[in-house]
Image: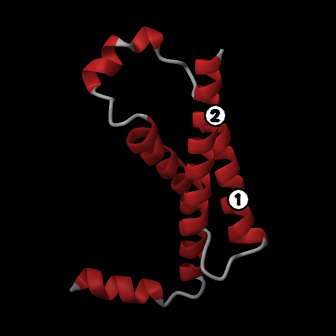
Amino acid sequence: MIIGVVSVVGALIPGILDQFQTFLLIIGSVFIPAFSLMIVDYYLLGRQRYTSAQLIQAEHSLPAFNWLALGSYGIGALLAYYWNWVAPLDFGASLPVFVITGALYFVVSKAVAGKRVAA
């Protein structure tokens, strides 16, 4: 009961919900592209091949950075920033950023893998 009263009184403070909305937009801009990359990498590109034993055994053969994922993440984060603050979309930026970031990473990864096989 006390927590409910404190929450209602806190919500009535002018401007506090505006700051919370800004916080949620920042969190979305940072994490949505990252979640998109993880889902695409695990389910579409990796075919669920990662296990903890494989990661520990293959430690020396794993790349330090996945540059394709990092570049896709950067583009996704920039799109999230643009569509949240510069030119906000009526329906929000989360879903478009999620789809575009994942699609970009998938297409670029497949293209690079195709070049490696051909070479």
- Which residue is found at the position 52% from the left and 87% from the top? 13
Q: Is residue 108 above or below residue 2?
A: above
Residue placed furthest toward the left: 1
Read off the residue under disc 2. Answer: 111
Query: Is 56 on the left or on the right of 112, as rendered?
Result: left
- Horizontal and vertical percent for residue 62? 47, 17
- Which residue is found at the position 46% from the left and 37% from the top? 45
Q: Is residue 103 above or below residue 58?
A: below
Name the amino acid, label 1. Leu
Dividing the picture into quadrants, the one containing residue 52 is top left
Query: Is 51 on the left or on the right of 102, as rendered?
Result: left
- Horizontal and vertical percent for residue 10? 44, 83
Tag 2's secondary structure? helix
- Which residue is found at the position 38% from the left and 43% from the top? 43
- Which residue is found at the position 41% from the left and 89% from the top? 9
The image quadrant where one finds the C terminus is top right
Read off the residue under disc 1. Answer: 79
> Callout 2 environment at 10 Å: few (<14), some (14 to 19), or many (20+)?
few
Q: Which residue is nearer to you in this view: 18 or 118? A: 118
The image quadrant where one finds the N terminus is bottom left
- Horizontal and vertical percent for residue 63? 53, 18
Name the amino acid, label 2. Ala
> Callout 1 environment at 10 Å: few (<14), some (14 to 19), or many (20+)?
many
Q: Which residue is nearer to you in this view: 100 or 70? A: 100
Residue placed furthest toward the front: 118
Q: Is residue 59 above or below residue 73?
A: above
- Horizontal and vertical percent for residue 55? 34, 20
Q: Which residue is nearer to you in this view: 38 or 106? A: 106
Residue 53: give its label.
none
Rounded to the nearest whole Å, what is the CA distance between mark 1 and mark 2? 22 Å
